[in-house]
Structures are given as structure tokens and as C-alpha cells.
Image: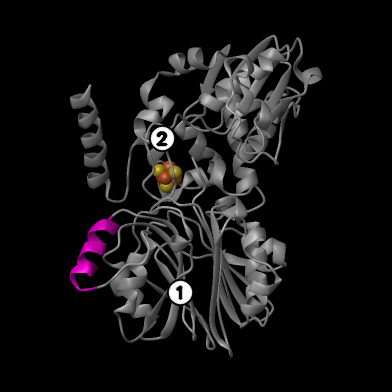
Amino acid sequence: MKEECGVFGIFNHPEASRLATLGLHALQHRGQEAAGIASWGSHGFCRRVGLGLVSSVFDRRKLSALSGHLAIGHVRYATAGRGGVRNAQPLVAQSFWGKMALAHNGNLTNSGELKRRLQRRGVRFTSSSDTEVILRALSLERGDLSGALRRVLAAVRGAYSLVVATPQALMAVRDPKGFRPLCLGSYGESYLVASETCAFDLIGAQYLRDVAPGEILRLDSGGLSSSYLEEAVRRSFCVFELVYFAKPSSRAGEASVYQVRRQMGRELAREAPVRADRVIPVPDSAVVHAEGFAEESGIPFAMALIRSHYVGRTFIEPRQSIRDFGAKLKYAVVREAVCARRVVLVDDSIVRGTTCRKLVRLIYDAGAREVHLRIGSPPITHPCFYGIDTPTQKELVASRLSVEEIRKFLGVESLAFLSVEGMLRATGKTPEDFCTACFTGQYREDGERIRSQLDASRSAKLCAS
Ligand code: SF4
């Protein structure tokens, strides 16, 4: 499971693009393939994008070109469309309102159909990103920008948190089900929007509130105004943001990520107790789950797995004699913390299970007597179509194997997952307000189309076998 994208926007600040760069640094965990900023000011419009991390894309020269009082930014992980600089956002088009730029976090489920419709009207596309469908459709519109967004987005299905900017205004929009997060903040006389509040914290801005599902926020010289895409529909905030994607220091889905994650660990300890000597997290994402598990169970917590943050790609082919090479490059075990002990290894989720299996082996090799595995979310059985990059269904270990079969595959003494009910209880919110499709298969947007796609790929596999 890979993070999707992060968006940022700021209106009415003389250092808008510099603050946008800082905001993107804070959102870097949401996408590392590309970064970009578009800005507007008295010198006109400027856009700079590039492949790689924010720190490698923006140097002093690029930043000084990005002058102005309004800026939007994006960090990208490609969930739709290929990688490459052509797909780096913000995407830009000429429009009725002047130069318009758009940055998107999410995934549209009917972008192919919308694209073909626009192509029949003679519209040309320059990227393979689903985001361009919204931009091109908007660029054909006239009149009030909020009304134009309402008309265009009425035909769009799927997940989107958008920032759209023209020379006069910054718009922030969230799809009616609110799959992906989007927050509003203030900084002196300026307003900001960002995927997560960690972007506000870095700058020293104030979090005001979440952009509501289906809300269109407009920030312009007249201040802040709000309208809605349609009447309230069933909210479907991505629960996986709270399990894994969002930073523990952020607020997401109107909740403290840290508190929800810790509560998930506590629920897990209540649901699946175990006799052990140490609770060990898989760093970095499961540290807070493990903290909650240790608190609830009374078993001492130990940072016995150390993750290296300096591993890039390696082109050295591991031989059988040095198997687990990849896992050893990334993780080291503190032998003194596990040797001759019964350990509870806590992870946030299991996708393919291959990394987890290697980690279990490393811990046994370091002398652990027993390894019990506890997972801070339910088994992932279905792929995501709303902005998270997941493997195909057949690659998800929990879609093929029972819990007992997974336990044997991983080689652990015992294995337990947090229940769906326990996960939702930990949020402290109304359970019906969350999307849980990757755990339950209950797709709330374009469900019929998605289920028929999954059925088709399953029967294609049956025919081939
Ligand atoms: S399917 Fe899973 S990852 Fe995708 S939006 Fe729903 S909860 Fe989030």
C-alpha cells in the first residue's frame, strides 16, 4: 500500500511559494515521485515541477521564480497514469478565468469514460493522469468558478480532494463522500489548505477545520466563502488514513491520528491478548499501535527493530547464501532486546506478507524464543479504487489464505488481526462515516462497476488456469 498524494494551497501571502515548499516538505510522506508548485503574482504566473523529493526539486533559483501571493503545490505518488514529469502536478490550462492550475489527491473511477467524452469534443490531453479530465472539462466552462466546478464535478465519480487556482482565487474542493482528507488553516491574514495539518504545524499556521465532504471553499480578496456540490451523502472517510497513511502528528478526518492509532493498539490488546516479555513495533508506521498495545497489556515496549532511512534502491542481486538481504538492509534487530524472550511483534497491516515474513525470520535469528504477531487493522482482502495504490486482489495474502494459513506462511507462534468493529470503535466516531472497502469489499462509490471489474478479473484468471 503506497501513500497517494498531498496537496497544499495558500492565498494572500507575499511568500506564498516558500510557505508552499515548507508545506510540501511536511506532506512528503504522501508522495515521493514528483513535486510541483504553481504561483500567481504581479509578475504573472509561474509553475515549476520535477521528479523526486521536494528538497531535490526546489532550489533557490526555482523558488525565486515562483513569486506571488497565491500558490498551490503537490507531492505525487502515481495512483493513476504513469510516472514521469508530464504527469507531475499542479497541471495547468488556459481558461475563461486566465491561467488555471489544479492539484489532486484521490482517484477517479470514471475518468476513462469522461476522457473519451471530452476527446469527442476535440479536447487534447497532454498527460495520462486522471486529474487532467477535471482540468480540461473546467477549461471549457464560463461564468462563476464555483458554479463551473459544480457542473464539472457532477459527472465525476470517485475520490478527490482538489486545490484549484486562478489569478483571482484559490478553491478547495472535497468529493461528496470525503474519501481523502483536506484541512483549512489560517496564518495571519492568509488562508491555507492542506491534505494534513502537519503542513500547518511546520509553518506555525492555525488549524481551523476540515473542508467538509462535498464543500467548495473559495478564498479570494473578499475573504472566505463556502458552497456545496450536492446535498449531504453518506460520508466515507478512508479509515486507512488513520491506520497507516497520515502522520501521527496530524489531524485527519477530524481526529487526532496519534490518539486513534494508539486506541487501535489498545483494542487489539483487548481482543487478542498474549503472554509475552516484550512488545516490538515494526517501525515507523506501527510504533503508535505498539505503544497502545503495550499500555493495555502491561507488557514492556522495546524498539528492537531499527529501520534505516538511508536505503535507496539496490542493484545487488542477493544470492541464496545472503537471503533476506533486502530486509537486513532496511531493518536491524537489537539482539539484547529479543534474545531468549517471547516477543509480540506489532504491525499496522499486512499486504503481501513478504516483508513481515522476513522480519519474523530476522527476530528468530536474533534469538527470540517465541514471536507472536498482532496486526493493528483487519485483513486486507480487496484493492482500493479511491486513491491508494494497492496490489491486485490475488496478490493480497488475506484474499487467498485464512488467518491460520497466513500464520503458517509467516512462521509465527500466533497471529491475530484487529476486527473491523474494533478498528472503527478506536476512531471514536460514527462507524458508518468510514470507507472500509479494502477490509470488507463494501465499495461505496461506483460499487457495481468495481465489483464487476473484480469479477471479470477473477473469471479471466479462472479461464486462464
Ligand atoms: S478502500 Fe481502503 S484504502 Fe481505499 S479509501 Fe477505502 S479504506 Fe481507504
Tell me the tag on residue 439. Answer: 2
Is residue 402 depicted above or below 191 in this figure? Answer: above
Q: Position of residue 33 (x, y in %)?
A: 54, 53
Q: Position of residue 442 (x, y in %)?
A: 33, 40
Q: Is residue 135 visible?
A: yes
Is residue 166 depicted above or below 307 in this figure? Answer: below
Q: Name the residue under label 1.
A: 101
As shown in the figure, which amino acid type bears the numbered disc 1? Ala
Element type where label 2 sits in the image: helix
Q: Residue at x 27, y 50 (%)?
A: 446
Tell me the tag on residue 430. Answer: none
Whole-number angstrom distance, CA of label 1 to CA of label 2 = 35 Å
Is residue 136 depicted above or below 189 in this figure? Answer: above
Is residue 17 depicted above or below 456 in this figure? Answer: below
Is 116 colored magenta in this rendering?
yes
Magenta residues, dominant SS class: helix
Q: Can residue 428 be seen in this view?
A: no
Q: Which residue is drawn at 40% across and 86% down?
A: 97
- Magenta residues span 110-122
Q: Which residue is drawn at 44% across and 61% down?
A: 87
**Some atom of ligand 1 lies within 8 Å of the CB belonging to the residue at label 2:** yes
Residue situated in front as seen by the camera: 445 or 226? 445
In the rendered image, the quadrant that contains the C terminus is top left
Q: How crowded is mark 1: few (under 14 residues within 10 Å), some or many (20 or more)?
A: many
Is 125 colored magenta in this rendering?
no
Q: Quadrant of residue 461?
A: top left
Q: In this view, does 141 lie to the left or right of 121?
A: right
Eye-nearest disc, 1 or 2? 1
Q: Which residue is drawn at 18% across and 69% down?
A: 120
